[in-house]
Image (spheres, coloured by chain):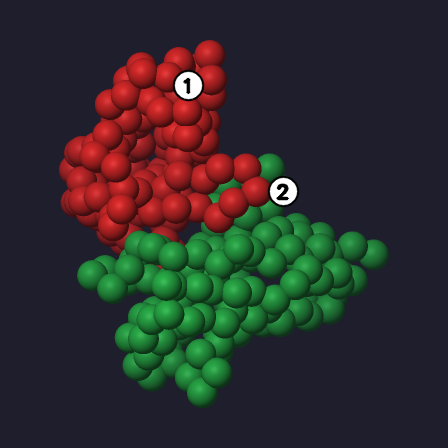
Amino acid sequence: EIVLTQSPATLSLSPGERATLSCRASESISKYLGWYQQKPGQAPRLLIFDASNRATGVPVRFIGSGSGADFTLTISSLEPEDFAVYYCQQRGDWPPFTFGPGTKVELK
Amino acid sequence: QVQMVQSGAEVRKPGASVKVSCKSSGYSFSRYYMHWVRQAPGQGLEWVGMISPSDGSTSYAQKFQGRVTMTRDPSTTTDYMEMSSLKSEDTAVYYCARGLYEDYGYFDFWGHGAQVTVSS
C-alpha cells in the first residue's frame, strides 16, 4: 500500500501570502497524484489531478507540481476562502487509493 | 447540475449492518464510477471501495473485504454501500464520490456525507 506523508501539518499564514504544501509518497507514483480541499462540515473538493491539472472551476492560484514521489501544491496568493485542510491522494498503485493525513492552512 | 444526495444519519449497535444510499442526478449515471470514502471524527479520508458503471463490478480496500458490499440501481440512479459486522471504529461520515471521467481514480463530485454511528 502506498503511504503518503504531508508536511507541514499546519501552516499559519496571512491573506495574500504564498502557501507551499508538500506530499511525499512511499514509492514512485509517476504523475498520479491529486489534491483536495476540505472546509469544516463540508465534503472534500477536487483541486488538482495528475499532479498538475486543475479540475474544472479551480482558480489559477492553485498550482500543482512534482512527479515520482515528491509533489507540491502551491497557492500563489491566499484568499480568505482558502483557509482549509488540504489532502493529497494517490491513484498510482491501487487498490487501495490512499490519502495523506492532511495539511491545515490556518489564519495567522 | 450534478447532485448526489445521500441518506440520513444512522445509529447501529456493534455487530449490526448499515446500508447507505447515494442518489445521483444531473449527469449520465451509467458512464461514471462511484467510490465510497469515509472520515472518522477529526480524522483524515479513507477509501472504502468503488463500483464500475458498466458491469457493476467492485473493488474494495482489503481491510473491508468480506464486510462491505457496493451495488447500484441504474433505474433509480442510486448507489448503495452496505457494511456489516460494525464496530465502534466504523463510526464515521461516509461519502459517495464520483470518479472523474478522464480518470476514475480521482473524485470530482462528492455527496454531502452520511453519518454512521456505532455505539452500544
- The label number, if any, that marks residue A11 in the structure image: 1
The residue shown at (35%, 55%) is B107
- Crowding at dot 2, Cα within 10 Å, few <14 / some 14-19 / many 20+, comes out as few
- B61 or B33: which is nearer to us? B33
Res B35 seen here: no
- Tell me which amino acid carries mark 1: Leu
Q: Quadrant of the C terminus of chain B?
A: bottom right
Corner quadrant of residue B75 = bottom left
| Distance (Cα) linking label 2 and label 1 | 21 Å
Q: Residue furthest bottom?
A: B75
Secondary element at image label 1 = strand
Give the total number of marks visible in the rendering. 2
Q: Eyeballing the image, is A58 above or below B37?
A: above
- Tell me which amino acid carries mark 2: Pro
The residue shown at (45%, 31%) is A84
The residue shown at (18%, 44%) is A53
Residue B37 % position (x, y)? 48, 56
Q: Chain of mark 1?
A: A
* Tint of chain B: green
- Crowding at dot 1, Cα within 10 Å, few <14 / some 14-19 / many 20+, comes out as some
Q: Quadrant of the N terminus of chain B?
A: bottom left
- The label number, if any, that marks residue B47 in the structure image: none
Residue at which label 2 appears: B41
* Tint of chain A: red
Q: Is A92 on the left or on the right of B65, as rendered?
A: left
Q: Chain of mark 2?
A: B
- B45 or A14: which is nearer to us? A14
Whether discs 2 and 1 lie on one chain: the answer is no
Q: Residue furthest front?
A: B1
The residue shown at (55%, 48%) is B39
